[in-house]
Amino acid sequence: MTKENIILYARLLRSIFETTNALEIARQLQYEVHFVDADIRSIKANTYRYENGTKAIFINKKYDDISRNILCAHELGHAVFNHEYKHNYKDKNLKNEYDVNLFAVALLFDDSFNIPLVKMSNYTLQSILDKNINPPA
């Protein structure tokens, strides 16, 4: 999928469901969304695909609502793009991580950046997401 198509798809979902609430979009797409009580060093969020094909998004409930929405948007990208393997969240070079970060930023934020989304590096996209995630108290 091209960068432009990823952005268009995120914006299409935002338009269809009339929201930037990734949790609501995930539920409307019939993905299970679960909140887990875990140490944030072991899990922020992840996506899991059951043997029957059902997909679930797990989000650490220690994060506030804004942070949960951002984490869900990232994981929703993994779910909609059918990523089969769990990748290291910190690895900035993986194409899957770039795609889902681009998807999440396009889903959650308006085009009010100085750089067009298609020209942003994964580092920039990840920084936008990370700067908006509040660490749990």
Image (tube, rainbow, N blue to C red):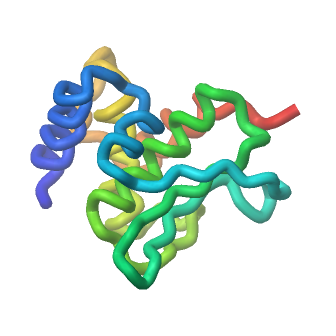
Find residue 30 and report its horizontal and vertical position in percent.
Answer: 35, 51
Find residue 1 and report its horizontal and vertical position in percent.
Answer: 13, 60
Is 88 drawn above or below residue 51 in the view shown? above
Quadrant of the rendered image containing residue 79? bottom left
Residue sitting at x 18%, y 29%: 16
Q: Nearer the viewer, residue 102 or 54?
A: 54
Find residue 135 and report its horizontal and vertical position in percent.
Answer: 77, 36
In this view, which residue lies farthest toward the top? Answer: 112
Quadrant of the rendered image containing residue 111? top left
Q: Which of 35 and 67 is in front in this view?
A: 35
Quadrant of the rendered image containing residue 55? bottom left
Q: Nearer the viewer, residue 67 or 115?
A: 67
Residue sitting at x 51%, y 56%: 57
Q: Nearer the viewer, residue 8 or 49?
A: 49
Residue sitting at x 24%, y 39%: 10
Check the picture and name the quadrant holding the C terminus. top right
Q: Is residue 104 left or right of residue 13?
A: right
Find residue 54 and report its horizontal and vertical position in percent.
Answer: 39, 69
